Amino acid sequence: MEAIACRGLTKRYGSVIAVDNLDLCVEQGSVFGFLGPNGAGKTTTVRLLVGLSQPTGGQASIVGQCVRINSVDLRSRIGYLPEEPSFYNWMSGRDFLLYVGELFRLPSKENKVRCDELLEFAGLKEAAKRKIGGYSKGMRQRLGLAQAMMNRPDVLFLDEPCSALDPIGRREVLDAIVKLKSHTTIFMSTHILADVERTCDTVGIIDKGRLVIQEDTQRLRERFARPVFEVEVEGDASRLAARIRSLPWVTAVEEAGRESGAMLRIRAGDIAAARRELPGIVSDSGLILIRYELISPSLEDVFIQMIGVREKS
């Protein structure tokens, strides 16, 4: 079943097209990574999907319900964590969650139980009575996740949930997102590729308001990213690099200097030929081999390739 569906969704601001004829489908129970560079249209798309902005054209639906601006019924079925969540800093974390529960008209007993569940989930049980103004950024983001889950939403929207966090805060928030996988459909907008790779089942890449591709995360790597051979040697590697560049199965060679040598990153159009011939070529160079490794492709490789194709077109 489709948790989210967009058909020709468009948003213009004067002559600027922020979202351009977007067709998108997110399956129920999945974690969807909405990936793109800053300014690609990610936040605008999220605002359209949660009913905070009126589309110029097209339409969207959440769990079969048409999205309309300021729809109270729709908001009862979704959770939303904006890029920069706001809190009442004079409130404690517990008081804030209870307040959110009251806004959703949860019965008093259920509200308290749900509040305790989410404080435990967010790792904020010990800090529940502290004022939010004294929370770290990571704690505030985890509190934001908790408030977004207060109504047990069918779909949870996260807009750049880790962009302003330090490594520890990022890890805490990503761990919390992973825990949510079994509870709700998650739509996560981000420009941090490693976060998508760690948490998401499916990826959509947007650039300049248009969807470049939507695909299963693993399948995306397999289709568009090829492994890279990394060769680290002692000594001058310029002749070795030139020799490798001349081979018919090589598509690119990147050379980076090291304190006592060099590191070559080699991309091959024919992986089998590279596996077969490259070790002998390195051995024949007479250089001392420090490291030889086949690096598996990442979403970063895919992202650079897809965005590069669009920029050239």
Image (cartoon, rainbow, N blue to C red):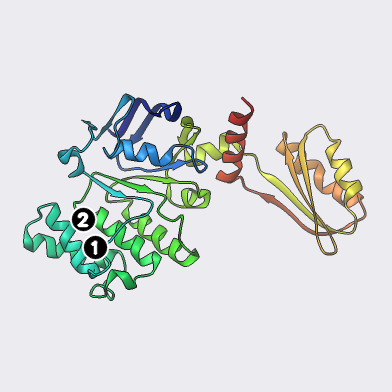
Q: Quadrant of residue 150?
A: bottom left
Q: Residue 225 carries which label?
A: none
Is residue 313 found left or right of 257 in the rendered image? left
Alpha carbons under labels 1 and 2: distance apart = 8 Å
Considering the numbered disc 1 on the image, is that residue within a helix, a strand or a loop? helix
Residue found at x 28% / y 74%: 127
Q: Are marks 1 and 2 in contact (CB under 8 Å)?
A: yes
Q: Quadrant of residue 204?
A: top left
Q: Where is residue 299 in the image (x, y as percent from the top left)?
A: 55, 44
Q: Is mark 2 on a helix, strand or loop?
A: loop
Image quadrant holding the N terminus, namely top left
The residue wearing badge 2 is 150
Looking at the rendered structure, the kind of residue marked 2 is: Met
Residue type marked 1:
Leu
Q: Quadrant of the rendered structure where residue 137 is?
A: bottom left
Please report the residue visible at 73 percent of the width from the left and 34 percent of the height from the top.
270
Q: From the viewer's side, name the closer residue of 127 and 14.
A: 14
Asked if 140 appears above or below 228 in the picture, the reply is below
Say which residue label 1 marks: 118
Report the residue that reaches farthest toward the front. 14
8 relative to 79, above or below: above
Quadrant the C terminus occupies: top right
Graded by Cα atoms within 10 Å as few (under 14), some (14 to 19) or many (20 or more), the crowding at tag 1 reads: many
Q: How many labels does the image show?
A: 2
- Rendering coords of residue 196 (x, y %): 47, 48
Q: Nearest the camera: 98 or 117?
A: 98
Lower position in the chain sequence, tag 1 or tag 2? 1
